[in-house]
């Protein structure tokens, strides 16, 4: 039984993570933290967890957590997370970090996009990117894993097999992405209030969203340097629904590409993957809601490759992927608690 601490347990990601840990046969949650001044019980913050845990949300030092836990999930904002992660890993804990602090391998790129000095730059180039479908062997046995962002997960899973197979060009990729309101977190913000976001579809972070360099980095690695680095145009949109995420990606085809060859590449990549399905009709977000699954669809239309990928932003886009990584890090069946 692995003793588990969850940092930032009061948010939506923390809630979904605790739901999954509650049914994990090899995990026992022994500490949950908050940055809030008061220390409520988990049941007070998340009534959905009533009867599952007898724990208080606490403010704990790294030494206190190290005495209680073997593994930590850090669901904290960027920069704040790396400060905590550094102390935990130094004390021998394994950590799955759900922030953006270890996803980018280049310190200068991180500091440009996030506007802060990285507190633990030495680990940037050695921390595996926690997308098991692409980097499973790097994740196995790792001490620290960088859990991917939700938009990058959906976009990369749709595009990576086609780039790897040389079926699409590395330039000219456009990603039109949409996510439910839970993707913005639990803290109240004016544009997330019901009268503001209901019956309203709005873009945000146009040309400036911090997930863009993360997508560039992983897709460039997958493409293997073919025709230079990948630089996508990525535009996210807020959709007035609780959860769910869809990426519709457009790419230029290489020579002699057909819808059949595109689907063949996706099937070759994913037919043996437990959580990815290549579908033959365009998917919707409800097809994968409350699951760790991703559905991918593709076809060639008027000289453009279109790829549609859908996930639950809180599960496959965050907490479910974190459990998948937890399982791989500890030599367990990666599907435990996720089916």
Image (cartoon, grey):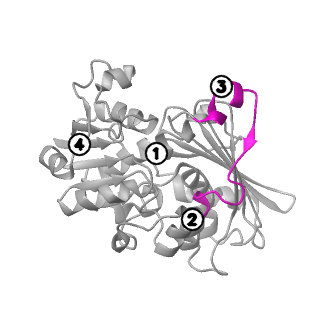
Q: Secondary structure at mark 4?
A: strand
Q: Which residues are magenta?
A: 189-213
Residue at which label 3 appears: 194
Q: Earlier in the sequence, mark 2 or mark 1?
A: 2
Q: Residue at x 61, y 31 (%)?
A: 286
Q: Tell me, yes or no, whether the two marked residues, 3 and 4, touch with CB atoms within 8 Å.
A: no
Image position, residue 26 (x, y; %): 21, 40
> The N terminus appears in which quarter of the rendering?
top left
Q: Residues within 10 Å of mark 1 (few under 14, many from 20)?
A: many
Q: Look at the numbered discs 3 and 1 and tell me whether their residues touch, using CB distance below 8 Å.
A: no
Q: Earlier in the sequence, mark 3 or mark 1?
A: 3
Q: Which residue is mark 4?
A: 4
* Badge 4 density bin: few <14, some 14–19, many ≥20, Cα 10 Å: many
> Measured from the top left, where is residue 229 in percent x and y?
62, 77
Residue 335, percent across and down? 36, 43
Q: Quadrant of residue 174?
A: bottom right
Residue 94 is one of the magenta-drawn residues: no
Q: Is residue 269 left or right of residue 235?
A: left
- The residue identified by callout 1 is 318
């Amino acid at each position: 039984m692995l003793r588990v601490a969850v940092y930032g347990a009061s948010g939506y990601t923390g809630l979904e993570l605790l739901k999954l840990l509650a049914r994990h046969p090899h995990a026992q949650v022994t500490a949950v933290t908050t940055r809030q001044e008061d220390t409520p019980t988990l049941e007070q913050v998340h009534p959905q967890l009533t009867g599952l845990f007898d724990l208080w949300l606490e403010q704990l030092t790294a030494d206190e957590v190290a005495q209680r836990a073997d593994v930590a999930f850090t669901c904290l904002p960027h920069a704040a997370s790396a400060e905590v992660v550094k102390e935990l890993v130094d004390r021998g804990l394994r950590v799955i970090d759900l922030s953006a602090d270890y996803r980018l391998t280049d310190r200068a790129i991180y500091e440009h996009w996030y506007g802060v000095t990285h507190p633990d730059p030495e680990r940037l180039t050695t921390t595996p990117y926690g997308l098991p479908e692409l980097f499973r062997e790097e994740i196995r046995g790792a001490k620290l894993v960088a859990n991917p962002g939700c938009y990058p997960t959906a976009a990369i899973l749709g595009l990576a097999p086609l780039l790897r197979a040389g079926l699409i060009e590395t330039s000219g990729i456009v990603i039109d992405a949409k996510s439910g309101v839970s993707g913005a977190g639990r803290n109240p913000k004016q544009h997330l209030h019901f009268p503001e976001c209901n019956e309203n579809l709005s873009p945000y972070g146009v040309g400036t969203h911090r997930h863009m360099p993360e997508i560039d980095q992983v897709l460039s690695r997958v493409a293997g340097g073919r025709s230079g680095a990948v630089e996508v145009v990525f535009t996210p949109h807020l959709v007035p629904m609780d959860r769910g995420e869809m990426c519709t990606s457009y790419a230029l085809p290489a020579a002699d590409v057909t819808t059949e060859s595109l689907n063949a590449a996706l099937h070759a990549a994913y037919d043996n993957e437990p959580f990815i399905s290549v579908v033959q009709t365009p998917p919707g977000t409800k097809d994968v809601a409350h699951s760790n699954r991703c559905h991918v669809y593709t076809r060639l239309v008027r000289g453009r490759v279109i790829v549609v990928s859908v996930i639950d932003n809180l599960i496959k886009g965050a907490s479910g992927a974190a459990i998948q990584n937890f399982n791989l890090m500890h030599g367990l069946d990666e599907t435990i608690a996720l089916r």
